[in-house]
Amino acid sequence: MEFLQYFGGVFEPIALLLLVGGTIGGLILGATPGLSPTMAVALLIPFTFHLSPTHGLILLGAAYTSTVAGGAVSAILLKIPGAPANIATALDGNAMARNGDGTRALQLSFLASGVGGIIGVLLLIFLTPVLAQWALAFGPSHLFWLAILGVTVIGSLDSRSFVKGLLSGCIGLWISMIGYDDVQGAERFIFSDALTGGVSIIPALIGLFAIPQVMEMFSKGREAAAIEQVRVSNYPISRSMVELFQSWRALSIGTVLGSIVGLIPGVGGQIAGLVAYDQTRKMSPHKAKFGTGHSEGVIAAESANNAMVGPSLVPLLTLSIPGSPTAAVLLGGLLIHGIFPGSDLFDNHPQVAWTFINSMLLGQVLMVIFGIYTAVWAARIAQVPPSVMASAVLILAIFGSYSVQLSMGDVYIMLVLGVGMFFLERFGFSAAPLVLGLILGPIAEANFIQGNLIANAQNGPLEYFCTGTLNIFLIVLVVASIAYSFWSNMLENRSAAAARKKQELAQ
Amino acid sequence: MTASRLQHSLMATAVLALAATVTWLSFTQEPADAFLFPRLISVVFLSLALWNFARAMFGMARVGEGISADLVKKILPGLFVAIVFVFFAAKSLGFYVSSTITFLLIHTLYDPTSPYELKGWLRRIVTTAVFMSVIYALFSLLLKVQTPRGMFF
C-alpha cells in the first residue's frame, strides 16, 4: 500500500491545476476527429520540459486518460470516433443519440470509462511494484533483449505490414545512433550541422506524430466538413448510474478484456473496444439490439478502452516496453527528465512514480465529472474547421520543438522527420515502431556494449547473450511476436486474395 | 485505393538505398568499436529492406494508399508555406511575425470559404489573432521562451 503515502502530492495546487487542465484539454482534443491521443500527448511534451518530472507526468497522464474517453463524444454525437479506440463506441452510441438518447449515451460512456479506468489503474498500482522487483534481476543482456522486444512487438503488432513495421523499427534504431557515440566520442551518421547533437526525442516525437496529421488535413484540400451534430436533451445522471450497474455483464466483460489487452504490449485500445463489444454481443440475450442503439454496446466498448490505459503502463513502467503508441510517447516524457523505468523509477524516484500513478486514479474521477458536464460543449469545439486545426497544430509543433533547446536545428529535424513519415505512412510504414526504435535504441546500445565487455571477459558474446533461462525466454518472445505477426499477415493476404478472386469471378 | 506496383517499388528502392548506405557506413567508418551496434542493426535493416524490395518488385506489397497527383496538388501549397516558414522566414522576419503569416496563409489556402468573401477574411484574421495571442502568452510570457527576432519579432 506504498501508493497511499504519496497521495498528498496529487492535491498540491499546481498538481491539481495541471490534472484539471490536462483532463479538460484532453477531453476536447480527444473529441476532435483527426487529432489522435498520441499526437495530443506528443504536443504536450515540450510543456512538461519546463515542469518538474512529477508535474510533467501528471499532465501527460491526465491527457492520456481523458483523450481516450473524449473520443467517445465525437463517436456518439458526430459518428466520427475521436480515436481508433472509440470505433466500437460509435456503433451503438450514435444510434442512441439519433434515437434521442444522446445524453444517456454520453453519461453511460463516461461512467463506464470511469469504472473501467479505475480498475485498470488499480491493476497498474498492484502489478507494477511486483514486476519492477522482478526487473531487478535483469542484467545487460536481458535489458538488451527487452529493448529489442519492445521494438519488435510494436513493429510487428502495430503495423499493417509486419515487414514494414520491423523496417520502421530499424529506421528508428538508426536515427537513435546519429550523433556522437557515448563511449568513444566518434562521429556517426552526421550528414548536417543540425545533426551534430543527435536527434532529440521531443522534436522527433512531435514531428513523427503531429506533422503527418497536419499533412493528412492538407490532403483534404478545401473540402467543407459536412458534420452533423445530434442535438441532446437533459437526462438524470442517477438513472444512468442505475442502468450502468444493471448492465454489469457488459461492464465486467469490457473491464476484464480491456485490462488483459492493455497488458499485452502493442495491441492497443482499438482492439480492446472491438473485442469487448463483440464478446458482449455474443453473450447478451439481446444480441439483435446491438447496432441499433443498445446501451450495452457503449458500456462494453468504453469500459474496455479505458481499462486498457492503466495496464498498458505496466510493461512501460517496469520493463520499458510501452503497451501502446501513447505509452511510447510517455516513455519519451520520462527519459527527458532522466528517469528510467523499472526499479530505478520505484527505488530512486518513488515520489514521481506514485504521485503520477495516483494522479491517474484521481484523473479517472475528474474525467467522469468533466466529461459528463462538458461533453456537448467539447463536441462543439471539436468541429473546428480542418484549416484552423492544421495551422494550429503546425504552429504548436514548431514552437514546441523550438522551445526545448531553443534550437532551430530541432525545428528542421521535426519538419523533415514529419514529412518523411507522412510519405512512409502512405506506403504502410508506421510511426509507433519508429518512435520505439528511436527511444529504445540508446538503451539497447548501452546494454549491448556493457554486455559485450562482460562477455569478452567471460566465454564470448554468443554465450552471454543467448544462453540462460531469461535470455532464452526473451529471445523466444521476440521470435514469437515476429512469427505471430507473419502468420496473421499471411492469413490476411490469403483472405484478401480469395476475396479478389471471388470478385473477379462475379464480374 | 492502394498504391501501384511502381510506387511501391520506388519506395522500396529508397528504403533499400538508405539501408545500404547505413550498412556501408557502419562497416567502413572507424573506430570499429563505435560502430559495433550500428553494424548489428544495419545487417538486420538491410535484410529487411531487401525482403521488402523483393515483395514490392513481385507485386506482393499492397499495404498503403500511395501518392496520387491530386494528393500532391493538395498538400503542396501547405507544405511549401511550412518549409518557407521554417527554413527562411522564421529567422529573417522573426518567429512571431512569420508564424502569424503562416497561420493566416494556411488557414486561407484550406478554408472552404471563398477567398473573395470579406466576411471570410475577417473571420480568418480574428482566428489568427486570437490563436497567436494564446501562443505568445503561453511561450513568451509563461514559459519565457526566447525566439529568433529577425527584422520584426
Image: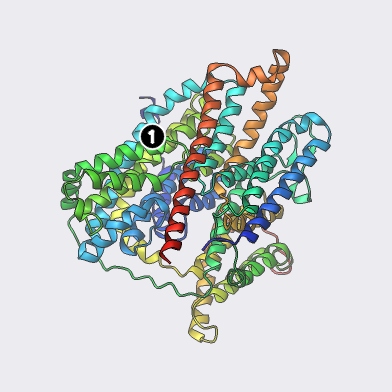
> What residue sits 58% from the left and 69% below the top?
B71
Q: Is residue A199 shown left or right of residue A211?
A: right
Q: Which of A287 and A28 is in front in this view?
A: A287
Q: Which residue is identified by label 1?
A: A8
Q: Which of B50 and A270 is in front in this view?
A: B50
Instruction: Give the x, y percent position of residue A159.
Output: 52, 47
Q: Mark 1 lies on which chain?
A: A
In what quadrant of the picture does the C terminus of chain A appear?
A: bottom left
Q: Quadrant location of residue A121?
A: top left
Q: Quadrant location of residue A355?
A: top left
Q: Nearer the viewer, residue A192 or A444?
A: A444
How crowded pointer 1 is (Cα within 10 Å; few <14, some 14-19, many 20+) is rated as few
Q: What residue type is labelled 1?
A: Gly
> What residue sits 81% from the left and 30% below the top?
B32
Instruction: Give the x, y percent position of residue A33.
Output: 43, 61
> What residue sits 34% from the left and 55% below the top?
A72
Instruction: Give the x, y percent position of residue A262.
Output: 40, 38
Query: Outermost residue toward the top?
Result: A458
B55, above or below A460, in the image: below
Q: Nearer the viewer, residue A126 or A297?
A: A297
